[in-house]
Amino acid sequence: MRFKALILLSLFIFVSCKTYTIPTDSFKEQFTKTEQFETKEVQINNPLLYGNLSYKANNIKNLVVRDKEGNFLTIPNSPSLEMRITHKNGKRYIFYFDTVVLENDILKASRSRFIPSLTKSIPLDSISKIEVQEGGKNFKYKN
């Protein structure tokens, strides 16, 4: 009985996460706006332990994305929003969207909240696909 419930819960979580895409040119345009380029210090709750986590986050308030039907939508940035980058060679990387910055056509982002030095830099011209989805993690801004 528990096994069936676990499978149903997993299936519900997997199916309920909406995935959106961002065309590379749209991504670049959204990240090169002067007022959104700077980062800010933020704090989020630590769902594993008591206390907060601090890190530098981008200043993007909302993100323009495309749904499966090709419609453009605006979604709010949040600490649980995840971004999946697919290279032209098929390799994939997952980041937290609010840590993503674009510097000189190089995407830089953090792969972990708990190990802030675990970052990756990817040339924008080597990216074939950018996807975002609400990761369902219990991260919330404290400030």
Image (tube, helix red, strand yellow):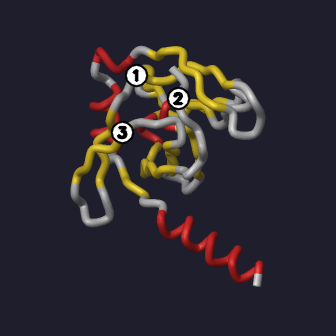
- Res 50 label: none
Q: Nearer the viewer, residue 36 or 75?
A: 75
Q: Amino acid at mark 2?
A: Tyr
Q: Can residue 128 be spotted in the picture?
A: no
Mark 1 vs 3: CB contact within 8 A? no
The percent coordinates of residue 109 (x first, y second) are 56, 31
Q: Nearer the viewer, residue 115 or 22?
A: 115
Between circles 2 and 1, the one closer to the viewer is 2
Quadrant holding the N terminus: bottom right
User: What residue is drawn where x is 29% and y is 53%?
Assistant: 66
Quarter of the image for residue 118 reads top right
Q: Say left or right for 2 vs 14.
A: right
The percent coordinates of residue 2 (x first, y second) are 77, 78
**Of marks 2 and 3, which one's residue comes earlier in the chain?**
3
Q: Which residue is mark 1?
A: 59
Q: Which residue is mark 3?
A: 76
Between circles 2 and 3, the one closer to the viewer is 2
The residue tagged with tag 2: helix, strand or loop? loop
Q: Nearer the viewer, residue 115 or 49?
A: 49
Q: Amino acid at mark 3?
A: Pro
The percent coordinates of residue 95 (x first, y second) are 57, 40
**Of marks 1 and 3, which one's residue comes earlier in the chain?**
1
Q: Amino acid at mark 1?
A: Asn
Q: Say left or right for 97 vs 36.
A: right
User: What residue is drawn where x is 54% and y is 15%?
Assistant: 41
Q: Which residue is mark 2?
A: 141
The residue tagged with tag 1: helix, strand or loop? loop
Q: Residues within 10 Å of mark 3 (few under 14, many from 20)?
A: few
Answer above or below: position of 130 versus 52. Answer: below
Answer above or below: position of 75 versus 68. Answer: above
Q: Can residue 62 be spotted in the picture?
A: yes
